[in-house]
Image (cartoon, rainbow, N blue to C red):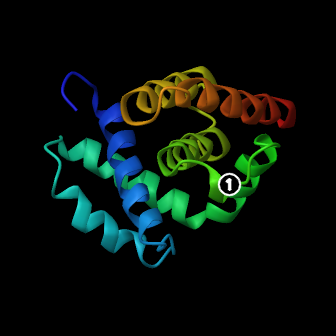
Amino acid sequence: MGGTGPRRQAREIALQVLYAADAARDLEQASLPGVFERIVTEFQAPARAKERARELVVGIAANLKQIDERIAAACSHWKLHRLAAVDRNVLRTATYELLFEPEVPAEVVIDEAVEIARRFAGEASPAFVNGVLDVIARDRAGRT
């Protein structure tokens, strides 16, 4: 995670916690704090990045159904469970920010998600993540 700011580090930590929980099929709101505690010890990151990651994970867990519904609606040709796990969890993190943290500009959320997908996911992932999040962001803009 070298060379990145605390907000990017927080998003990357959140991604890895969600990925671990998703792989264990344990994305329950009650379970994620425990998964977070096990995973966060692996990271050299400032306390504020870890705290921000915790906020993201808790928020995503509390709103997972709504987040997944929005992603599924934006992925008209893909079933959510068929998406690559990294893509699915990058999308969950960014969708949470788009839906529940409107003070963060959509362009920033999308750019960060694309960069994280570029770092952690497959070759086609950045364009896919960008396209899905663009749909969700446009829908958010239409609702405000």
* Count of numbered marks: 1
Quadrant of res 5: top left
Across and down, in percent, residue 69 comes to 75, 56
Q: Residue at x 68, y 54 (%)?
A: 80
97, above or below 56, in the image:
above
Frontmost residue, 21 versus 11: 21
Residue found 54% across the figure and 31% down from its top: 125
The amino acid type of the residue labelled 1 equals: Leu
Quickly name the residue at label 1.
Answer: 80
Q: What residue appears at the point 47 percent right and 64 percent down from the top-left corner?
A: 22
The answer to which quarter of the image holds residue 120 is top left
Camera-nearest residue between 139 and 104: 139
Q: Where is residue 62 shown, x and y percent of the image?
A: 57, 66
Question: Is 4 placed above or below 54 here?
Answer: above
Residue 55: give x, y in percent of width and height: 42, 54
Q: Residues within 10 Å of mark 1 (few under 14, many from 20)?
A: some
* Residue lying at the far right of the rendered structure: 142
x and y percentages locating residue 9 in the rendered image:
30, 37
- Please name whichever residue, 7 or 129, is drawn nearer the observer in this view of the structure: 129
SS state under label 1: helix
- Quick one: quadrant of the N terminus? top left
> Is 44 situated left or right of 14 in this image?
left
Horizontally, residue 95 falls left or right of residue 25, namely: right
Would you say 50 lies left or right of 136 here? left
* Image quadrant where one finds the C terminus: top right
* Image vertical order of residue 60 relative to residue 112, above or below: below
